[in-house]
Image (spheres, rainbow, N blue to C red):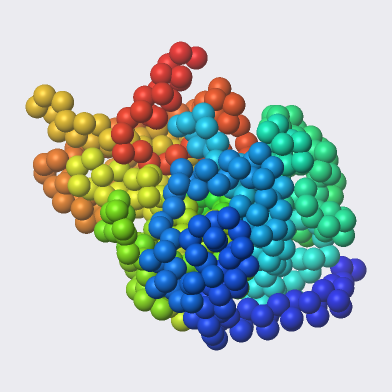
Amino acid sequence: MRILNPAIKSYIKLRWGVIDNFLLHPHEAQTMMFNSLISSAQFTQFGKQYDFDKINQLKDFKQAVPIHTYEDMYPYIERMLHGEQNISWRSDINWFAQSSGTTSEKSKFIPVSTESLEEGQYKAGKDVLALYYRNFPQSKLMSGKVLVMGGSHQVNKLNADSFYGDLSAVVLQNLSYWHQLTRTPDLSIALLDDWEEKIERMANATADEDVSYIAGVPTWTSVLLNRIKEIKQTDDILNVWPNLELYIHGGVNFDPYKEQFKDFFPSRPIHYQETYNASEGFFAAQDIVGRDGMLLLLSHGIFYEFMPMEELGKDKPETLSLSEVEMGVNYALVVSTNAGLWRYMIGDTIAFTSLNPYRIKVTGRTKHFINAFGEEVIIENADQAISEASKYTNTNVSDYTAAPIYFSGKENGAHQWLIECEIAEDKKQNFIEILDKTLQNVNSDYEAKRQKDIALRMPEVTFLPKGSFTEWLKSKNKLGGQNKVPRLSNDRKLIEEIIQFLSLK
C-alpha cells in the first residue's frame, strides 16, 4: 500500500503557510526581497559601482541602475566565468546555466548561486508539489518517483572549478542525496550529452520504475513516451506506470500538445501543472490545476519589474512595480536576482490573468513575434491557432515555426508556416483555414490585415514529416536540453535556413 510519509505531510502544510503569507502580503514580500537583495550585494563590485549603499527605495534603484540585457551583463559574467568572485553577487558563483538559441552559435551563461538554487529552484520545486497537494490532498504523488527530463553539463574550460550546463542539469547535479533517491533515471543517464542515446537509455532504465509524476519540456517528453510505448508494446503509458498521476510542464505553451498527450493515457486522464522556470529563475507555478494562469512566486530570491511594451527600445524605459500592473497588458519581464542579475530583461513577455492573487501567463518573447505588416502576432496567438486547428482536424502537431513572406511585385504579403505533424491529405486545407480564422479571432490587427487580402493573403503552410525539426536541431548540435525551435520570427533568416536544410536532405 502506497502511504505518504507523515514528515512529508507536515512539510507540505508548512509550505502552505509560507505561500499563504506572500499571497496575503504580496507587496510587502517584494519590498522585503528588494531590501534583502540590495543589502546582500552592496559590497560586490557591481554594488559598489552603482552605490548600493545609498539605495533606500525603489526609485533610487531605478535611477542608479539601468536596464540590462545579456550583452550588458556579459562583462561581469565573463569575469565570473574566468573564476573571479564577488562581482555581482556576494557568494561564489561556480555554476552557470547555459541558455542557447538556434539562430546563433553563441550561448548565454547565466550565473547560478547557492542561494538561487536553495531559495529559488529547490524551494519553488517543493512549492509546486505543495500547491498540487492543496488541489488533491489525497494524492500519493510522493510515494513514487519523479522522472525528470534533464539536460547535460560539461566542465567549464575557462576555469577548472566552474561548471555549466542546461538549467535542469545544474539543478539535478546539485540535488541532495535524499532527493536523488526520489528521482529517475540515474544521473549517469540523465546528464548524457547525446540525446539519441539518452532517450534510448532513459526509456530502458525507467520503464520498470514506479513513476508517479513526470517533469520536463513537452517536446522531449513526448519522444521518450513514444519510445517507451514501443519498448513495452503498449498504447497506454499507464500500463507501464499505473500510479502516474501528474505531468509538470513548462518551457513552451502546452496547448498544441494537449491532444498528443491525451493519446498517451487513453485509459484515464492524468493531471497537468504548468510552471515558469527559466535559466534566470523560477518565476511562477500553477496553483489551481486546470485554471489558466500561474501564481507569481514572490519570496524566492527574485525582485520583479514590469516594462510596458511601448517602453521597449527606449534609452531610459520606464518599468512598473507589482502594485502598478494591470490585467491583460503585455509586459516585458525585468528581474533582479540572488545570483547577481540586476534589472535584467530576460526576453519574455507576460500578462496578468489575476491581480488577487497575482497570476501570470507567458505571452511570448520580446524578439519572437511577427509584425512585418502591423499584424503584431505573438506566440500566444500562434499557439491558440495551432491548438484549434489541431483539435478540429484531430492532428497532433509536434512543433512549428512561422515567418513573414514579404510583398513581391503585385503579390501582397503572407505568413509562411512550417508545421511538423501527421495529417491526412484531405484535412490539410481545413487545418490551414482554421489556423487563419483563429488568428483573426484572437488578433484584431491580423484580422484587419486579412480583410479582403488587403495586406495579408492566406497563410502558406508546409506540413513536415515527423522528426524534421529534430534533424535540423541535430545538424546544428542543438539537440535536446532547453534548445527548441523558435516559434515566430520577424524576418526570413531562420525559416530559409530550415527550408534549405530540408531541401538538401
The residue lying at 36 percent from left, 24 percent from top is: 496
Q: For residue 157, which quarter of the picture?
A: top right
Q: Please give left or right for residue 131 compared with residue 191 in the image.
A: left
Q: Vertically, is 89 above or below 34?
A: above
Position of residue 240 measured from the top left corner of the image (x, y, whole percent): 78, 48
Q: Vertically, is 112 above or below 275?
A: above
The residue lying at 76 percent from left, 66 percent from top is: 141
Residue farthest along the top direction in this orientation: 504
Residue 27 seen in the current view: yes
Quarter of the image with the N terminus is bottom right
Residue farthest along the bottom direction in this orientation: 24
Task: From the viewer's side, name the closer residue of 306 and 13.
Answer: 306
The residue lying at 54 percent from left, 29 percent from top is: 473
Q: Please give left or right for residue 236 compared with residue 206 in the image.
A: left
Task: From the viewer's side, name the closer residue of 370 and 86.
Answer: 86
The residue lying at 58 percent from left, 41 percent from top is: 78
Q: For residue 494, which quarter of the picture?
A: top left
Task: From the viewer's side, name the closer residue of 326 and 281.
Answer: 281
Residue 257 seen in the current view: no
